[in-house]
Image (cartoon, grey):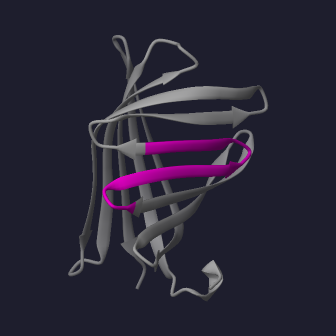
Amino acid sequence: MALHDLEQQSVKVTLKTKITVGSESEAYELITFGTKFQKNSSFYLQYTEESEAGKIQTTVKYKDNEILLLRNGATKMRQLFREGEATNGHYESLYGMLTLLTETKSAKHQWNEKTKEGRFEISYQMQMQGAEPGQYEMTLIYKEEA
């Protein structure tokens, strides 16, 4: 069964990210639109981000308390979040490929059937190519469009 054959629901996506490295903190917020769908026992959320480099198609896959973040397009990224575990990933841009080491403190997914709203909350420490690790707080809220 192809992904386009599955029942997809349009959603409004709000992505909030806070990054702290040393004593410096930065916060970002992105609002966009995408789709959510279920395939077997996996839940998928897909949306497109615009960056200076171009469009990035993002897929979030949730299964068995594991969150996989995939980005394709202007930048490519693969990052796996498992609560209490360190996982390897990669980030690829015009400048080449960098390795990621992600230590997930918490990774949660919630869905509220009444409000038709879901959220991912991920707290992790990430080290890119051996550089000083940063602390990341990512909240991804999605709500079905009427």
Question: In the rendered view, does 140 fall on the left or right side of 30?
Answer: left
Q: Residue 75: name its quadrant.
A: top right
**Image position, residue 60 (x, y; %):** 49, 58
**Up-down relation of residue 136 to residue 139 (above or below):** above
- The magenta segment is 63-80
Q: Identify the residue shown where x is 79% and y is 32%.
A: 94
Q: Residue 34: name its quadrant.
A: bottom right
Residue 123 on the magenta span:
no
Front residue of 16 and 2: 2
Residue 65 on the magenta span:
yes
Q: Identify the residue shown where x is 43% and y is 18%.
A: 133
Q: Identify the residue shown where x is 40% and y is 39%.
A: 17
**Image position, residue 63 (x, y; %):** 38, 63
- Principal SS element in the magenta part? strand
- Quarter of the picture containing the N terminus is bottom right
Question: In the rendered view, does 145 fall on the left or right side of 85?
Answer: right
